[in-house]
Image (cartoon, rainbow, N blue to C red):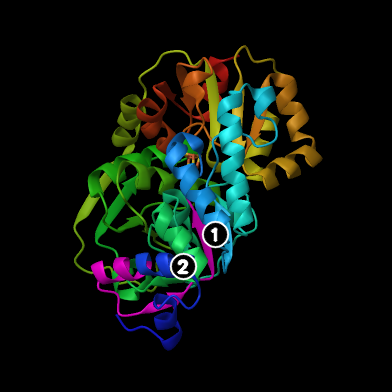
Amino acid sequence: MYLTKEEEKILEGEYGEVMERMFRLLVRLGDIYKAEKMIPVGSVQVAGVSYKSISDPGLEFLEDLASKDAKVKVLTFLNPAGMDLENWDKLGFPRDFAEKQIRIMNAFKKMGIVITSTCTPYLAGNLPRSREHIAWSESSAVSFANSVIGARTNREGGPSALAAAICGRTPYYGLHLWENRQPTIKIEVDARLEFNSDFGALGYYIGKQVKNKIPYFTGIKNANTDQLKALGAAMAASGAVALYHIENLTPESDLISKDNLETINVTQKEIDETYDTLTSGVEPDIVILGCPHASLREISTLASKVKDRKLRKPVWICTSRMMKEAADRMGFTEIIEKAGGYIVADTCMVVSPIEKMGYNTTGVNSGKAANYLPGFCKQKVVFANIDRLLEAIE
Ligand code: F3S
């Protein structure tokens, strides 16, 4: 790979041991994927934040890096942590877990990373522009950045994202290159897409079929950004889709080549069957919305639906701290809490230890969460739209 004079100096250790170690990791990655050079990145999003995912070895690795004065060079945000960083006690998160999680956050903060823990960084202050090269980790955020914003990122692992943040660079390969952003399969949709969960069901079904291909959708007449994030998250979870295009909706759809694509048809039947496939439980003992992290619009929708209702079981909506603060100001938090719910910030149903908090069956409207909850959190799942879920716990 071509390296600039400055990059060679990094490898010679002129900028310290941490930079050298991190840059070696990026060079190795670039060599594997035959990158011709390194490119600067505009921002980074690092996964591997929850104590549940990284446990003691991860915590020690981060504390070691921070103690050696590792510092990030670009705007860097974090994926969800394992708990609400402010209200963990009130919500029943275990104290020993919380203490370790706080040490993880302190190590990240010492490195200059913004300890905003969210899978929707683009809603919380880390918004790339179209065609900007970035190095993000979280699969749903990668999908949204590539597909809806038109930024360019591969799906980074936790260590390679951290290395990109510390070095301000990433190897130039994969989805950073225009020729690799062309669709490789066409999806013709003829189904009713009304609720966000319908987009989650569609995404789950397609992800399973296409694995890591790049879908080009037709037949989706309209979708707001919440629905697009639900679609992309589910496709990235059940498959490994990091980029998709939708006719007339996503920014690169007019620029790509759509010739000679194999076609998959999706009808209402496949959507309905996906709801059944993803449902393994009968009655939820908690409903958790906000996968990916909820926008203010989704929080306001929940508030309007639970206003003056009293729920028998809790409903959580997971979001970023920024959205939670806006919801507090707008009075949404108060309405949701009065009905028996919580706006839970900084974490989500998959990376928090809900299985240790007495929950066995979780109701979700997210195809991604429905995909992961059985394995990651030993949950039975009820996958349905928001109206059905709220009826089930009223
Ligand atoms: Fe985000 Fe957690 Fe879902 S990280 S995309 S809310 S599984």
Q: Work out which quarter of the rendered image holds the N terminus and state it.
A: bottom left
User: What is the quadrant of residue 335 in the picture?
Assistant: top right
Which span of residues is magenta-colored?
A: 26-47
Few, some or many C-alpha atoms within 10 Å of disc 2 (few <14, some 14-19, many ≥20)? some
Instruction: Say which element carries label 2.
Output: helix
Question: Relative to residue 35, is residue 239 depicted above or below?
Answer: above
Whether residue 37 appears in magenta in the rendering, the answer is yes
Q: Are marks 2 and 1 in contact (CB under 8 Å)?
A: yes
- How packed mark 1 is, by other alpha carbons closer than 10 Å (few <14, some 14-19, many 20 or more), is few
Q: Nearer the viewer, residue 167 or 36?
A: 167
Residue 17 is tagged as 2
Label whose residue precedes the other's in the sequence (2 or 1): 2
**Residue at horizontal 57%, vertical 37%?**
101
Residue position marked by numbered label 1 in the rendering: 68
Q: In the image, is 278 to the left or to the right of 227?
A: left
Nearest the camera: 54 or 267? 54
Please give the name of the residue rendered at 38% of the width and 62% of the height, measured from the top-left corner: 154
Q: Is residue 159 left or right of residue 196?
A: left
